[in-house]
Image (cartoon, coloured by chain):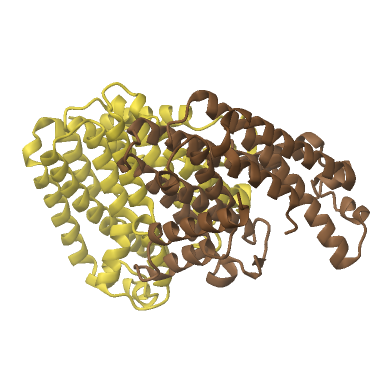
Chain colours: A brown, B yellow
Amino acid sequence: MDLETYLSSRLALVNHALERLIPSGEAYPQVIHQAMRYSTFAGGKRLRPILTLAAAEAVGGDPERALPTACALEMIHTYSLIHDDLPAMDNDDFRRGIPTCHKAYGEAMAILAGDALLTRAFEVLSGNAELPGVSPEVALRVIREVAEAAGSLGLIAGQVVDIQSEGVPVSTETLRYIHEHKTGVLFKTAVRSGALISMASEKKLVALTDYAGYLGLAFQITDDILDVEGTIEKLGKSVGSDEKKLKATYPALFGLARSKELAGEAVAQAISSLEGLGAPAEPLREMARYLLARDH
Amino acid sequence: MDLETYLSSRLALVNHALERLIPSGEAYPQVIHQAMRYSTFAGGKRLRPILTLAAAEAVGGDPERALPTACALEMIHTYSLIHDDLPAMDNDDFRRGIPTCHKAYGEAMAILAGDALLTRAFEVLSGNAELPGVSPEVALRVIREVAEAAGSLGLIAGQVVDIQSEGVPVSTETLRYIHEHKTGVLFKTAVRSGALISMASEKKLVALTDYAGYLGLAFQITDDILDVEGTIEKLGKSVGSDEKKLKATYPALFGLARSKELAGEAVAQAISSLEGLGAPAEPLREMARYLLARDH
């Protein structure tokens, strides 16, 4: 299979559906819908929703049926980025090369746009039972799993501990906690809900959950590595100076070489988790390999 | 019936259930759960969740079955207060006589506590189908209605237009829009979801929706009146000076006397909406009368 073609066709599916699922910028009050769309269509790779679609395919499901769920996960991802970027949080002025939501629309509108995307995600998920072949029980289970993943013991817990860890020495355990909660839980939920909505067997669900756990880990390690390598290249400063900032990263705790090994091991484990799933899981395997090779 | 006894017994039910439904302040990461609890247990009157329970009773349902739904609506109400109080929004330092969430826990934690309460509300609603007599279809319908009410065309729309209206002249139409969305939609959803979860007939649902619409209107008018009368009493300043602030209030647009008439008319219409519901709707009628007489 050609991964580039696969990813771009899935990205188009997701973008087209998001276009339909978020109220138009003409809907009153216009500014909130424009802010929601500004951040949603800021050029994300759509990794989480594509994982949802690929997981649906991996268990023999129809990716179209998983599309609203995929979009709901992307809305939740976008809401978390908007709120994380706020001055009171990470205070980032730019993301993906353009001003962050609060820089473009002001803080009040950015807070509300995040709130609205989170809320809209659950509204979209509540409509899943109207799709052919999706039972109301399954639709409710997806809502429960997504809410748990996004809540104060999941995604939000990761952000809380990340904020608390700024400027203080961080243990390996805390680093793992932050990554698992800021990245891992939403990866897992993206994959699981694609499988759930496709009526996957419990056995396949377990295999996919393992895959997603290793994939999330690999993603975070390579993210940390790219941060360091990008920094060295751009600023000419040593890895040591990053370590002094006490930022919770894999290279800071394990060194660059060992971090690369760890990322490779995680990808190998992700792929071997899918052994029982055969050819339909090939896009998921390719996505794991792609993750390791990415340079941005 | 004795309304005071009714309200205090229902308030105890709601508080007890909220205590159970929000993770303990010992749950890691503690600070987020402590912040969620700080604002949730800051002494609210629990008007919305009590409306949910009273609506369940009005259609012959078991208030216990409506309790998780009632609590979910209170969580959404609390999240909206936490976010509305933020410096970027209304910038309020105190609410109900104690420091607002961001004053007590910092802005980052207040934003996240609001996010977490909103998310937890949907998680709680996803569990409704496990209650005896609640079908998964009804549980999904409640989630859809609550998400619509809380979203960018409901509650959030009200806050957006309220922010946009600060310091500019506001038409009667805009005032109505703000009130209907900031207060009305959540009142309506509180009442409707109590009825839905109790398997109310479509006819009763319509009557209760009308009731809630008038009640929300009456609530907002009396709120505006109390603001003005409180202000006159406390600061000795005239109604005219409030009008100069161009704040979107009923007294500013209609004068105090006409506003009181309008509140009375709305309460009368709320009560007459319940004509077909007989004795079980008495708590809802009493609550409407109580609203008109309140002085805080």
Left or right relative to B144: residue B32: right
Along the viewing direction, whichever of A93 and A279 lies nearer the viewer: A279
Q: What's the residue at 73%, 54% (across, down)?
A: A294
Q: Is residue B218 above or below residue A128?
A: below
Quadrant position of residue B234: bottom left
| Residue A166 visible somewhere in the drawing | no
Residue at 42% x, 34% y: name it. B124
Residue B186 image position (x, y, % from top left): 32, 49
Residue sitting at x 20%, y 60%? B260
Could you tell me residue A130's position as x and y percent? 30, 42
Out of A225 and A61, give the one closest to the viewer. A61
Could you tell me which quadrant the C terminus of chain A lies in?
A: bottom right
Along the horizontal axis of the image, is A171 left or right of B178? right
Q: Nearer the viewer, residue B195 or A36?
A: A36
Residue sticking out furthest to the top: B132
Would residue B172 be found to the left or right of residue A7 on screen? left
Of residues B193 and B176, the one nearer the viewer is: B193
> Is residue B221 shown left or right of residue B108?
left
Residue A195 percent across, percent down from the top left: 49, 35
Position of residue A242 relative to residue B73, above or below, is below
Can see residue B193? Answer: yes
Tally the marks: 0
Q: Position of residue B229 (x, y in %)?
A: 32, 61
Where residue B17 sits, quadrant-wise, is top left
User: Residue at image x 62%, y 40%?
Assistant: A157
